[in-house]
Image (cartoon, rainbow, N blue to C red):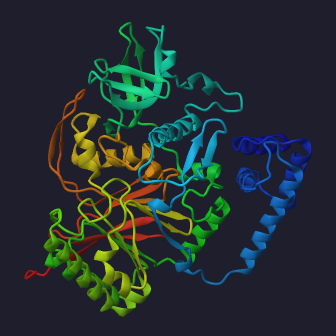
Amino acid sequence: MADDRQRRILKVFRKFSYSIGPEVSQKLEEILDHHDIADEDVESTMETLALEYSKQEDVDMKVNLSILHRVYESLQDQNERVDMEKELIDPDSHLFIIDAFDMPLWHWSQESGTFTRVTTPLTVSGSPESRILAIRDRLNIIKQCVLRNEHFAPSTLPSRDKERLVTLKSTKQLLGRAGDRFLLLGMLSHNKEGKLCIEDSDGSVELDFSKLDEPGDGLFTEGCFALVEGEYTEEATLEIIAIGQPPCEPRETSRSIYGHIDFLGKGSTSLLEDSRFSVRIREELPDLHFFFLSDVWLDQPQTLIGIQKMFDNCVENNFIPKLIVLCGNFTRQSISHGNSRDIQSYSENFDALADLIVSYPLITRSTHFVFVPGPLDITVNGTLPRHHLLLSLVSRLQSRIPKVHFATNPCRIKFFDQEIVIFREDTMSRMLRNVVGVKPNVNSENLKRFLVQTILDQAHLSPLTINIQPTLADYDHSLRLYPLPTAVSLQITKTLMLHFIPFMQLVLADKYDRYKITYTGCHVFNPGSFIGNSFVFSTYKPAEANSEECILDMDPEE
């Protein structure tokens, strides 16, 4: 049993790239014995210690006994403080609205095998180097997840499974090896001749899909990263027999390794703190809700009627949400460039909304309002990430609503241990216009699932090339979905398209209404357009990390 416990201790610290000597090993054994840690809890206990150890500024790759002792004493103090602080938690003090331009930039370092923070100022113009780094970071983040996947990572213990492990190769290893089979990870792109290729950091190779039966699940677009398996030919092409999305890494796995890294800029928390917060939310805030509305067309008279009806329901049932997120577009039709009358009307619509909100004092005092612009709204830029609404157009909202937030698109909500990403973009139609492969005979429900899977597998909200979907290179990290968030509010518009898939078949994509899908532990939901045959929005319950559809019927005269 002692040997088994030692192996578990070594396994955890090796995962964090640390080595331990005999004195440290003995100290860790003493800690486990002192607290009567059961065998099944050894790894989680060691992960807590290793994670806290990695946060220290003076650590070496070989664990230092004195630093470990300091970490242990600090954790003991934390436990004592938690036991003493059992008063009700304040949700407002743990609620953060995080703009895309406030998130720190972390590059993946090949040399150190971890993330390093960029300290130089970021600019909206970027540079050629930052554009290259943004794409390279996407590849490296996906690659380190793939190599950690059970199908690629060898076990430290003797096992027959090693024979079934898959080995990734680089494009430079193809040269002179015609007839051999390879597995590559790279970005799908077109070469100068218009042929589809896969490109990695070492080069590219043209793909031949003539022998492919059908691809794996997901939408394969130009700009997304894919795992392709095939035989290298004399014609310097890769004859594909299989293509699939890279595996998605669960949030718990990423947080167990990089929990000490503050990706959001609001302070990092340990897995132990996260688990405690999760329990307290379920116990102390079981009825707390967030509301999500999308396509809040303020130029339509029914919109304010619907919001008023929603407020009336809240007050009558004593069901006041902690947060209401209103996503654009806030106008049904785009505003003519330079048309002062349209701009004035656009601003007056927000004024009318402000007057409606303040007529409900209980909601005004208690609820946070977050406004996220859509593609047709007026912001200072049209490139992702988009800045918030122009404050000169929403001055009445800003002055009369005490808890109003004008957020970027995308933005994030950090609530205790949970992270919710809000993104308003015509994602489905854009990806279908640039898809290069998908399973045949796909229906609407499968396409919704494929969209969610692709975005989460790619760990990016816009897995397209910059000529298809331009992004601000220095802020491309704000579109990352790594570590995987708790939830994503992903609005896609209704569309009707017939699209030809180059190496598969014809795809019919019909209208896309509200939906919710949980994939690899991440809950993704689309609130749908607020106005239709009824008033529709989604409620998110942090205690359950789940959303529900809400429908308010329209009166006939409306």
**What x and y, as percent, mark residue 391?**
34, 74
- Residue 464 in percent (x, y) is at 34, 41
Residue at 44% in and 30% down: 186
Residue 277 pos. (x, y %): 60, 69
- The quarter of the picture where residue 379 lies is bottom left
Does residue 375 appear to the left or right of 479 in the view shown? Answer: left
Q: Is residue 101 left or right of residue 220?
A: right
Q: Does 127 appear above or below 66? A: above
Considering depth in this image, is 173 or 438 the residue closer to the camera? 173
Residue 520 visible in the shown view: no
Q: Which residue does the image show at 36% across and 53% down from the upper left? A: 384
Instruction: State which quarter of the image contains the N terminus.
Output: top right
- Where, quadrant-wise, is the C terminus in this rendering? bottom left
Question: Furthest-left residue in view?
Answer: 557
Work out whether 374 lies above or below 148. Answer: below
> In the picture shown, does residue 184 fall above or below 546?
above
Residue 204, position as x, y percentages in the image: 42, 23
